[in-house]
Image (cartoon, rainbow, N blue to C red):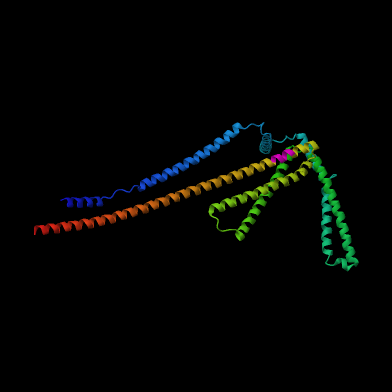
């Protein structure tokens, strides 16, 4: 009787295995909790960064950092002049004088229009004749051909000097007409802005071409073992560096081209110096704003990409852990099934031995 009870108890235990310690629901809960903690840490990091910036602004004392205060003041003045300031209005009397002087420059009476056109036509015809006359080895040929070439060269130089003199006189009269408006007028400010945006476009073209050359060199001599994130970060900062060089080149070009614009409006020395200083400060402020927006967007994009890559890595790690746990659970289930089979086989053998013993006893 004790042997039969022991056998059935062992079979009952083997047929009812214990539940594994970690099920799929527990694993998914652990995964969601880890992601929630990660997002909470990111929110706390952003909040701490914002609070740090606010604290720095509150604790900033302008008198203790005069250089920084002066630089920020110049930047604010430049942004105000570039986007919010309005030039001095032109009165009807000033505009009438300006139009009258413009009409006199190329007008029929005392104007330079016909004289300039005739001089330029004569210069172009002489240059074309010189090109057709001057053949290879004309210095060695001598005779009439050489003397004709020398005569045309002297004539070309004289006509070029006449064209330059007429253009110089026209520029002087045009400067006198613009002086009626002034460099601080709508026309002066508009021409200054057009010159800045012209140099800006040149810097942008330089950045685009340099990026194209870098991409071409990277295709020929670059590495191919970078992953997607490394490739994006490297090329993002390559484009930013090229654009930064192009923008500083635009500032230098604008600085050298600005004096001719101011001089073209007949500004005085005092007005020249003030307008030059304010225009350069405004150009630098605009360029720094553009670069700040580009760098901020690039850094934000890189940080976002890094966060996405980090989240993906954590998810992959969690998936690997879940897969390992599933494999362990399968192994445990297989081991328990093997134990159940062995327990069933032992129980049947014990029951068969018990029947044989009872049969012998009865016999």
For residue 249: magenta? no
Which quadrant of the rendered structure holds the C terminus?
bottom left
Give the side of residue 289 with respect to residue 183, left or right: left
Whether residue 198 is visible to the viewer of this picture, yes or no, is no
Q: Is 192 in front, or is 256?
A: 256
Magenta residues, dominant SS class: helix
On screen, residue 304 above or below 150: above
Residue 358 placement (x, y as % from top left): 12, 57
Residue 263 placement (x, y as % from top left): 79, 42
Residue located at (14% from left, 58% from top): 357
Image quadrant in which you'd find residue 65 = top right
On screen, residue 127 above or below 106: below
Residue 153 placement (x, y as % from top left): 86, 59
Residue located at (64% from left, 49% from top): 241
Give the side of residue 334 with respect to residue 111, left or right: left
The magenta stretch is 277-282
Residue located at (70% from left, 42% from top): 193
């Amino acid at each position: 009787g004790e042997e039969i009870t022991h056998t059935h108890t062992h079979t009952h235990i083997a047929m009812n295995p214990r539940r594994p310690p970690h099920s799929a629901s527990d694993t998914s809960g652990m995964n969601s909790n880890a992601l929630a903690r990660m997002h909470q840490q990111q929110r706390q990091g952003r909040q701490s960064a914002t609070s740090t910036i606010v604290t720095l602004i509150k604790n900033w004392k302008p008198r203790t950092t005069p250089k920084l205060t002066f630089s920020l003041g110049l930047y604010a003045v430049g942004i105000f002049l570039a986007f919010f300031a309005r030039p001095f209005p032109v009165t009807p009397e000033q505009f009438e004088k300006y139009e009258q002087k413009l009409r006199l420059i190329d007008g029929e009476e005392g104007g330079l229009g016909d004289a300039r056109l005739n001089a330029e036509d004569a210069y172009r015809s002489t240059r074309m004749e010189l090109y057709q006359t001057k053949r290879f080895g004309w210095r060695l040929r001598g005779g009439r051909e050489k003397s004709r070439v020398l005569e045309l060269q002297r004539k070309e130089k004289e006509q070029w000097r006449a064209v330059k003199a007429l253009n110089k006189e026209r520029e002087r009269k045009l400067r006198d007409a613009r002086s009626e408006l002034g460099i601080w007028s709508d026309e002066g400010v508009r021409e200054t802005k057009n010159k800045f945006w012209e140099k800006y476009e040149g810097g942008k073209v330089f950045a685009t071409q340099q990026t194209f050359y870098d991409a071409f060199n990277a295709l020929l001599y670059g590495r191919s073992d970078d992953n997607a994130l490394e490739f994006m970060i490297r090329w993002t900062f390559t484009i930013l560096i090229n654009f930064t060089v192009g923008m500083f080149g635009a500032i230098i070009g604008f600085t050298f081209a600005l004096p001719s614009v101011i001089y073209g409006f007949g500004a005085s020395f005092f007005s020249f110096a003030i307008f030059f200083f304010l225009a350069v400060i405004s150009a630098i402020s605009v360029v720094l704003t553009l670069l700040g927006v580009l760098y901020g967007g690039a850094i934000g994009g890189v940080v976002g990409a890094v966060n996405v890559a980090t989240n993906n890595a954590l998810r992959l790690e969690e998936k690997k852990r879940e897969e390992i746990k599933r494999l362990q659970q399968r192994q445990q289930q297989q081991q328990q099934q093997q134990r159940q089979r062995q327990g069933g086989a032992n129980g049947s053998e014990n029951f068969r031995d018990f029947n044989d013993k009872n049969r012998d006893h009865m016999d």
